[in-house]
Image: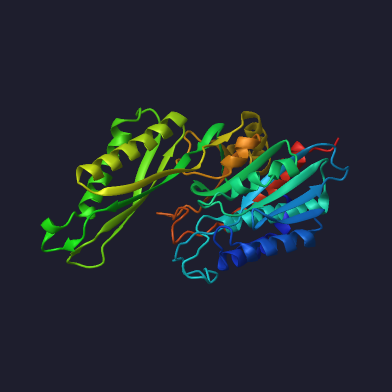
Amino acid sequence: MPIINRIAAYADDLTAWRRDFHEHPELGFEEVRTSKIVAEKLREFGVDEVVTGIAKTGVIGVIHGKHGGQGRAIGLRADMDALPILEETGLPYASKTPGKMHACGHDGHTTMLLGAARYLAETRNFDGTVYLIFQPAEEGLGGGREMVKEGLFSRYEMERVYGMHNWPGIPEGVFAWREGPVMAAAAQIDICITGRGAHGAQPHNGNDPIVIASQIVTALQTIVARRVDPNLPAVLTIGQIVAGDTYNVIPQQARMKGTARWFQPKVGDQLEHGVLRLVRGIAESFGASVEVEFRRTYPATVNDAEATTLARRAAEAVAGANAVRHMDQPTMGSEDFSFMLNEKSGCYIMLGGGRGRENEPMVHHPAYDFNDSLLPIGASYWATLVEQQLAKG
């Protein structure tokens, strides 16, 4: 069973919806326009129940099969939020909001689930119930966590929950799967060093927080290199240092931001303890004060074996067995779908969007753009997953 003909017939509609979402990006928990359009379309399609306001801007659509619930149900999740990035694609449908951009393809994820909703509400070729989960605030704000807190699985009982993400590094239309860990746990690191300001020509009168920050950055690299078992994946990155205002002034403070990634809990503990110990120790050795926070944000995303087998079967039905491949290694990116998988068995699968270009922009790049050719493929995958798992009879 390749791409579903009925879905292929409205591929132009999917493209129009996706590009409209792209033009009007909204950050986490601000997806007011996006969620309003999602809810309107679900009602237009004849979805049985549309619930808004869960986790502020989240939307749930409920579709029952031809023969009622039968006590069986699965959930399909798509994220809706954009990123605080200035778009550099130059496309005619580029973001109309400077500094905000759909640089991760959530515009496409939302559209693919809407495409599946239209088909499933029209055909209802299944027994049971499908829950369409349109989630806000995946990008660092934990919208998935908030949906779980607000009773996603107690209000909507389901056997399994599924997620999907486009991936430019995989060829177009190829699905990639993996049992067990597929994306990493993550933490955000905040450091504020307070030294003593001075004239740049009289450094002996101050205590330079920029020098201290430089020592900290260098020392932090030893945690992964010398403290963590080299057979266990770990990443520690400082992504921002902000200090000073001009050429000849030693500032009073330097602020740093970073991230850590891991899979095994003991590695997360090693990273946390190492960051706190080194940062405090180095600042003290220079006679400065410091505030440091290692804030765990997302747990690892771990796929259930049985749910992954079912996801593979649906992907093979749509794309063919040769276009469904095993991921040899998980990615060190993180994903708040992990909060849903902590509560319910399920699977998170990748859908390749690579166009075969040299230096193709990856997600979170200002020149990235979702590949619209994936829209009917992803929508067909969702629909096939439902029809297979909730097969009639």
Can you tell which quarter of the image residue 7 is in?
A: bottom right
Q: Residue at x 69, y 45 (%)?
A: 152
Q: Residue at x 44, y 57 (%)?
A: 365
**In which quadrant will I find the N terminus?**
top right
In this view, the residue farthest toward the right is 67
Q: How many marks?
A: 0
Horizontal side of 135 relative to 159 (left or right) equals left
Viewer-closest of 322 and 141: 141
Q: Residue at x 65, y 29 (%)?
A: 306
- Seen in the picture, residue 178 relative to 242 is either above or below; the reply is above
Horizontal side of 286 relative to 310 (left or right) equals left
Colour logic: rainbow
Viewer-closest of 15 and 236: 236
Can you tell which quarter of the image residue 180 is in?
A: top right
**In which quadrant will I find the C terminus?**
top right
Residue 319 visible? The answer is: no
Residue 186 visible? The answer is: yes
How far across and how far down the image is residue 335, in percent? Answer: 53, 45
Viewer-closest of 376 and 280: 280
Q: Residue at x 47, y 44 (%)?
A: 333
- Seen in the picture, residue 277 relative to 165 is either above or below; the reply is above
Can you tell which quarter of the image residue 233 is in?
A: top left
How far across and how far down the image is residue 260, in percent? Answer: 40, 42
Horizontal side of 9 relative to 343 (left or right) equals right
- Seen in the picture, residue 373 relative to 321 is either above or below; the reply is below
Viewer-closest of 386 and 262: 262
How far across and how far down the image is residue 147, in percent? Answer: 64, 48
